[in-house]
Image (tube, rainbow, N blue to C red):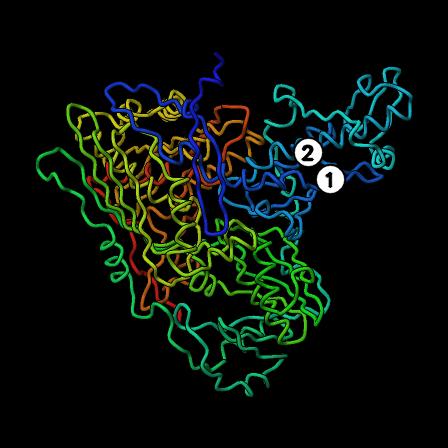
Amino acid sequence: MTRHARRRFLTYLVAAPTLAVATKIGLDAYAPGNADAAIPTPPAPADLVDLGDLLTLAGKPTANMLVLSVDEDGDVHFRLPREEVGQGLTTAVAMLVAEELDTPLGRVHIQLDDARPELLFNQLTGSSNSIRSLYDPVRHTAAAARARMVGAAADRWGLKARELTVRAGVVVAPDGRTASYGSLSAAAASLDPVALTVTPKKESEHTLVGTPTSRIDARALVTGKHAYALDLDVPGAKPCMVRRPPSVNGTVKAVNNESAVRAMPGVLDVVTLDTGVAVVAETFGQALDAKEALDVTWGPGTVDALSDDGIRARLKAATPSLDVLGVLVKKVEAEFDFAFASHAPMETNSAVADVRADRAEIWSGLKSPIAAQAAIAKAVGLPVSEVTVHVVQSGGSFGRRLFHDAALEAAVVSKKSGRPVRLMWSRIDDMRHGRMRPATHHRVRATYAAGQVLTFQHQVAAVETDFRHGLGDAVTAAAADLPTGIGNATFAQTLFLTTVKSPYNFGVTTQTLTEVPLRMHTGSWRSVYSANTRGAEEIVVDELAAKLGKDPVAFRRAFLKTARQRAVLDKAATAGDWGRSLPDGWAQGVGFHEEYKSCTACLVEIDATDPKKPRVTKAVIAADVGRVINPRGLEAQLLGGLTDAISTTLRAGLHIDRGLPLEGSYSQFHYARQKDSPRDVKIFVIEGADEPGGAGELGVPAAVGAVANAYARATGTRPRSFPVNFDVDFTPFPR
C-alpha cells in the first residue's frame, strides 16, 4: 500500500458569512517529535492549515492571471498584484522573474498593479503570504515567457527548441547564432502557447535565487528619486489637510468660522467630511495654517469615557480565572497587559485623487486595493468600472495600509471640491487618529508534575481589531462590516485560530480569544495576535523552566515538537554563547516562535543596570523559512522584527486618555532609536524545504519573549505590563 493510500485526511473548514474555503491536510504531514519527558500536544488548527494556506487556496483560481511583457529593447516588465511597503517584495519577485527568464536582474522592472477586481482574493498584501502565494505562479509565468522566446528562435532558425540555450537574455543556437529577447519579442507574442512546454527550473538549478541581493530600488530610495504618492505629478492636484476631532470617531456638528478660514491666504475650499473638516489650499503650509484656524463644534466620539485604566478593566473582565483545581496542582500563573501601539510608518497616510462627474482616479499606498476601489466607488457614486485605483509604493506599513482611509477621504474631498487634491495626514493625526494595534490582556496558566507540563491554558482578551478590509476583495470586506458578532468577529476568530499555536509539547494546550467590542481605530499590527500572545507565552516558558529547575534553552529544547525547531534553537544558543558570564545588571534572554511554515529563535543580551533605561546590546537570530529567495531581504525582515520587539517591549506604546491617544510624534511614541538598538546583531538563515514559508511577521514574537526574559533575569523582576517603562514623560499636543 502506498503512503498516499495510508494517509488519513482531515477536512478543515474556515467559514465567513460569504466565503467558505476548505482544504484537506494529511494528519501524518504534521509529525511532532518525541521530546523526552513531554506529554505530546495534539496539533492546533494553525498546525494543520494556517492563514497563509487559506489565502493561497482562496487565490488559486486567479493566481496565474499575471502580466509579464518583454519589450523591443529586451527589458522585462512585470505587473505585481501586491504592495511594496519596504519589505523588499519587488526585489524578491524580480529575482524570481530574472531566474526563470535567464536575464540580468537589472533588465527586470516591477510595476505595482492597479486594483483588479477580477483577481478576487489575490491582491491582498498581508499575513506573510506574498512570496508563499506568488512563488509558483511567478515562476510559471516567467518560464512561459522564456519558452516563447526559445520557441520564436527555434522557428526562425528551423531548429528544435530543446537544441537552444539562453544566456543573459540571449537565445543561443548550437552553431553560435544568437538572438536577443528584444529581437524575438514580437514573434514570441504570436506563438501558440498550447504548443509550448513550460517547466520552471528546479531549485537546484537556481543561480540568482538564494543569493544575497541588494534591493532593486535602493539607489532611488537613498537619493530621494523614488516617487511616493505625494510626489506624483498629477495636473492641478492641490494640497489638502483635515482638521480632526478631539477624540476617536468624534463628529462635526458645525464649522463656526468657515467664511473667515475661506478668506485666509491660499485657501481654495473648506469641505466637511464624516471624519473632520478638510481644507484645500495652494500649499501645504497654507492648508495646515487654515485647518488649525478652524473653529469646529464637535460631537462626541465612541470611547470618550474611556482611558487606559477603564480599557484594561474591560479586558481583564473578559478573561475570568479557570483555576478549578486550586492548590491540588503545581502551576505557573501570570497575567499580562500590552498597550496600544502605533504602526508609525515613516510616510503618513496620504493619497492623490481626481474625481470627475463620470470617472475617478486615485493614487495611494494600498495593501487591499480592490476593497479600496469598491469603497471609493460607493462614496463618490460611480460604478467600480469607472474608478481607477493606482497602487503606489509606500514608506512603511506594518499592517497600516490594509486600510484606505486617506484614499477615501481624498476621493470625497475631490468630488465635493470639484478639483484634484493631494491629501496628507499630519504626524499628530497619523498617531492619534490612525490605526493602532489593539491593547490586550492575557491570562496564562500551566500545570506541571514529575518534570512534565500537563496543561497550558492561554486566554487572550483584545480590543476588537478592525478587519473590514476582509481578504482584500469587495465581497469579504462587506461581510466583515456586518454587525458585531456576525462579520468582523468571524474574521477575528479565523485569523487567531489559523495563526496562533504553541511549538511545545505541553500536554493539553488551549489558546482562546475574546474580543471586546470598543469602537476604536484599530488594525492589524505586524504579527497581529502572535506578537503579544506568543511573547507572553515565552515569558511563562522561562518561568516554567525555573520552577522545574531547568535551564531556559535546555527546557525549550526538551519540549519543542520537531527536530527542525530544535536545530533553529540550537543555532541561536550556540552562536549567541548562551550561558556566558555577564556583569550584574546584564543578562541573556531567549525566545522561540513558529508560524506560516517558518520558525525562528532569538537570543538577546541586555544592559539593565538602570532598569528605567534598559538597552539591548547584542542579538543572535536563527531562522528556517524554507526556500529563501533573497537572504539579504530575509535578514532585513528579521532585524526589523527585532527592532519592533525592542520598541514595544521596553518603551513604545500609546496612552489612551478620554478617548484619544496622548502620543502625537516620534518624540512621544518612543520607538527605538539607533542608540537603543544593538550594535552586535548576527542572523543565521538555515535552508529548509523547497517551498518558501512566511517571513515578514515571523521575527517579532520570539524577540518579544527574548527581550522580556532578558529584562526579567537582569533586574530580578517579572514584567507583566508592556512596555515595561511607560511613563508620560512629555507634554501632549493640544486636542
Residue at mark 2 to residue at mark 1: CA–CA distance: 9 Å
Residue 562, quarter of picture: top left
Q: Is residue 640 depicted above or below 602 in this figure?
A: below
| 655 lies above or below 60 | below
In this rendering, the answer to whether 29 lies above or below 21 is above
Amino acid type at mark 2? Val
- Label 2: few (<14), some or many (≥20) within 10 Å? many
Q: Please tell me whether mark 2 sits on a helix, a strand or a loop.
A: helix
Q: Residue 565: give x, y in percent of width and height.
A: 38, 25
Left or right: residue 492 versus residue 192 is left
Q: Please state the horizontal and vertical placement of residue 698, each as a whole percent of the image.
A: 44, 37
Give the residue displayed 49% in from the left and 23% down from the top: 688
Q: Considering depth in this image, is 84 or 703 the residue closer to the camera? A: 84
Callout 2–callout 1 Cβ contact below 8 Å: yes
Left or right: 601 in relation to 108 = left
Q: Where residue 183 sits in the image (x, y, percent)?
A: 87, 33
Badge number at residue 356: none
Up/down of 521 relative to 77, above or below = below
Q: Judging from the image, what secondary structure is the residue with disc 1 in?
A: strand
Which image quarter: residue 411? bottom right
Q: Going by the image, does 105 lie left or right of 503?
A: right
- Say which residue label 1 marks: 68
| Residue extending furthest toward the left | 327
Indicate which disc residue 97 carries: 2
Residue 723 or 517: which is nearer the viewer?
A: 517
Residue 23 image position (x, y, % from top left): 49, 34
Which three-letter amino acid code belongs to the residue tagged 1? Answer: Leu
